[in-house]
Amino acid sequence: METIMVRVKEEHYFQEYSVSVDFSELFQLYNLRALDKSIVSCYCLLKMLECKRDEIKDIGFIDPDTMHVKTIEEPLYNRDTPETLLRFLKRQRDKKTILWPYNFQFHFILIVIKMYEGEVEVFDSLTKEPIQYKSCFLMLKSVWKTFIKEDQSHDWKPKLIWRANKKCAKQPPGTNLCGYYVCEYIHRIVSERANNERNREVVSVFVVGDMVMLVTGVTGGVMLVFGDFIGDMVMLVTSVTGGVMVVVGNVVGDMVMLVTSVIGGVMVVFGDIVDDMVMLVNGVTGGVMVLFGDVVGDMVMLVTGMTGCVTS
């Protein structure tokens, strides 16, 4: 057997079929040579699994094994391509971002479709001229018109705006690593979203006008509540089990730096107001250590660490 058949469920690429992976392509992969569309398609399937595991629900994918330059430009293959691309958009209308590894002229780029913004961002490790993937641009432009006409679930942008990501990593000259770079782009986008989702498990932010209520729940019977940002005043109320109650307030400016240290299990509270900065050092007995980060403008980042038997 010289080929591996990877069965794709309908829920992944919205049709049931099999991706054909030749052993020769695995040889290419192991030796860091040019990647085939089938390998990149399988990598996207892997990322779908990671998104499901990490409960990332706003990233979608377009199959590079069925949507590439040949299925767009060649008459023998492109009869059903517009309908296929339309199906990818319709079935993923609830995604904020759709990732499309696109292959043309033996080169991979990553097309990032930002659905609600109506933007298309191109990650290209060789910075090729857009004219070289013009057929993809025209196809997506045409299908987008049909999509916004037939789908009324959102106030979609009438036209897509294309731009190049000039800061994306570039491959060394004379190499065939474009497929690996596209996989790395995908990895970074998914990982960044995964980190954001994990942070939400610690901090829930509810913004109502000028008020931000931050609620952090920590295991081990410790509950920390921070809230009420009105204008430039911050009232921080910290409740800790065991009858300890700490109230710290009056922050002038937009920055608060909260640092907590535990020294010998002794509770210490200090406050220094210097211009727009308040530094609070707060230690709690019982082996509990809590770290609170930077408040700049309306953003608060809270990082909670626990010593002893209490974990974050």
Image (tube, rainbow, N blue to C red):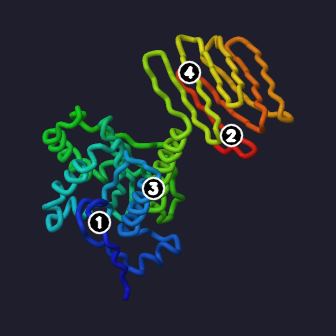
Label disc, if present, on residue 9 of the rendered structure: 1
Marks 4 & 2, CB-CB < 8 Å contact: no
Determine the residue positioned at 24% across, 59% down.
Answer: 14
The residue indicated by pointer 4 is 227
Disc 3 or 2, which lies upstream in sequence? 3
Label 4's element? strand
Query: Is 279 above or below relative to 74?
Result: above
Q: Nearer the viewer, residue 62 or 290?
A: 290
Label 2's element? loop
Marks 1 & 4, CB-CB < 8 Å contact: no
Determine the residue positioned at 24% across, 33% down.
Answer: 157
Q: Residues within 10 Å of mark 4 (few under 14, many from 20)?
A: some
Q: Residue furthest bottom?
A: 1
Picture quadrant of residue 277: top right
Q: Amino acid at mark 2?
A: Gly
Disc 1 or 3, which lies upstream in sequence? 1
Gap in angstroms between the C-alphas marked 4 and 3: 31 Å
Q: Amino acid at mark 3?
A: Arg
Q: Quadrant of the C terminus?
A: top right
The residue indicated by pointer 2 is 305
Residue 109 visible in rendering: yes
Gap in angstroms between the C-alphas marked 1 and 3: 17 Å
Gap in angstroms between the C-alphas marked 2 and 1: 41 Å
Q: Is residue 273 left or right of residue 165?
A: right
Q: Amino acid at mark 4?
A: Gly
The residue indicated by pointer 3 is 53
Q: Nearer the viewer, residue 174 or 252?
A: 252
Q: Nearer the viewer, mark 1 or mark 3?
A: 3
Label 1's element? loop
Q: Nearer the viewer, residue 66 or 131?
A: 66
Gap in angstroms between the C-alphas marked 1 and 4: 46 Å
